[in-house]
Amino acid sequence: MFIVGEETGCSIAELQNLDLCGVLKIKKLENVRSNVGSAKDANLKGKRHIQSLKLIWNDCDDVTIRENADCIAAGLQPNSKLKKLAIENYTGSKLPNLINSYLANLVELSLFRCHRCVQLPSLEKLPSPQTLAINEMNATMYFCNDSGQKGRFVLPYLKKLKVDDTPGLINLPDLPSIESLEPEFCKEEILTSATEITPPLKNFVISGFVKLTSFPQGLLRNKTHLLSLEISNCHKLESFSHELKSLSSLQSLCITNCPEIKSLSELEGLKSLKSLGIDRCDSLLSLPEGLKALKSLKHLSLSNCENITALPAAMQHLTGLHTLHIWSCPSLVTLPGWLGKLVELREMELWYCENLQCLPESMKRLTALQFL
């Protein structure tokens, strides 16, 4: 890590003759003198052994420094063998030309808190990006240089896309190779755009859609290869719109901080589910009887569900269950006698269930239990 300072011996030119390799992080770039030549003195383009580069500006109210960010970034051209590039707190209105086609080996690009950038760089010029993270880009409205572009913008090789706290962005590009999609704290239009994404999507995170009351039609129905689904911080979500039933390959499902969800009846169709986590779903009064259909379930976690008073009888059919975690369920008074039927249970945790008074005698039959 190199921190640019204003005093002698701390200028970015100190990097000029160093043969650096691996990961280089440069902080306080607002201290670089406002011209291209000053930034070029770092000779980043000549450092062919650097594989990961992080360029970080501090928050700054000085208008001149903000406006000169474009000029400084233009001089920070990295070497063509770079694999990972992260830019944080960049204050320019558009991202610099340092992201272009000559970065033929770039596979990961992260853009954090570049609040004044209206458009993303020309991503179509990058030959093979696989991971793209876009966080807190409040002004960003579109992916490509031409906001009126005809047809869908295509990122043919991208495998992972995370979009976090980017309220201006309302549409996704065409992502034919996407395997992991994580939209968080964005507008609901992003989910509508995501309905068109087809296999090979394997991991899907839906988080922070605070006004969403139900899933858009078709959001999950064509995601037949989906293995992992996380739904969190959707404070008004009441219904999954029967979208879960088609996820025949799903192995992991986590539902967190969705206080208006009253029923999980759609779970019975998840025949391949191995892990189920439910947290902070205050309107949930019980788990569904359809739970007995989840013959592949190995791990079950129930936490911070204040109104659940008992475990459903359907759970006694989950004889392949390996771990059971029950945390912060204050209305739970007893554990059922059939608990002893979970003969493959290896780990059981009971935390902060302050009204639970005793454990059932049938627990003696849990001979596979290793951790309590």
Image (cartoon, rainbow, N blue to C red):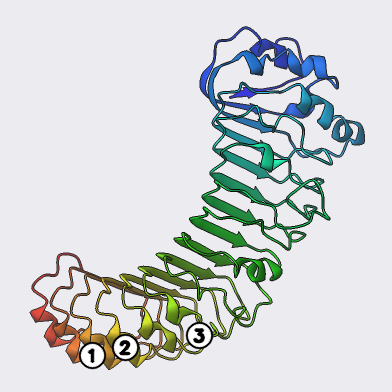
**Which of the pair 318/124 is nearer the observer?**
124
Closer to the chain start, of discs 3 and 1, is: 3
Is residue 197 shown to the viewer in this render?
yes
Q: CA distance from mark 3 to mark 1?
A: 30 Å
Which of the labelled discs sits on residue 234, or is there none?
none
Rendered view: 251 above or below 9: below
Can you identify the residue that label 2 sits on?
Answer: 311
Rendered view: 328 above or below 172: below
Q: Position of residue 334 (x, y in %)?
A: 28, 89
Residue type, label 3? His
x 44%, y 78%: residue = 246
Q: What SS does tag 2 mark?
A: loop
Q: Which image quadrant is residue 319 in?
A: bottom left
Can you identify the residue that label 3 sits on?
Answer: 242
Can you identify the residue that label 1 sits on?
Answer: 336
On-image quarter of the N terminus: top right
Crowding around mark 1 (Cα neighbors within 10 Å: few <14, some 14 to 19, many 20+) is: some
Q: What SS does tag 1 mark?
A: loop
Closer to the chain start, of discs 2 and 1, is: 2
Q: Is residue 372 left or right of residue 7?
A: left
Crowding around mark 2 (Cα neighbors within 10 Å: few <14, some 14 to 19, many 20+) is: some
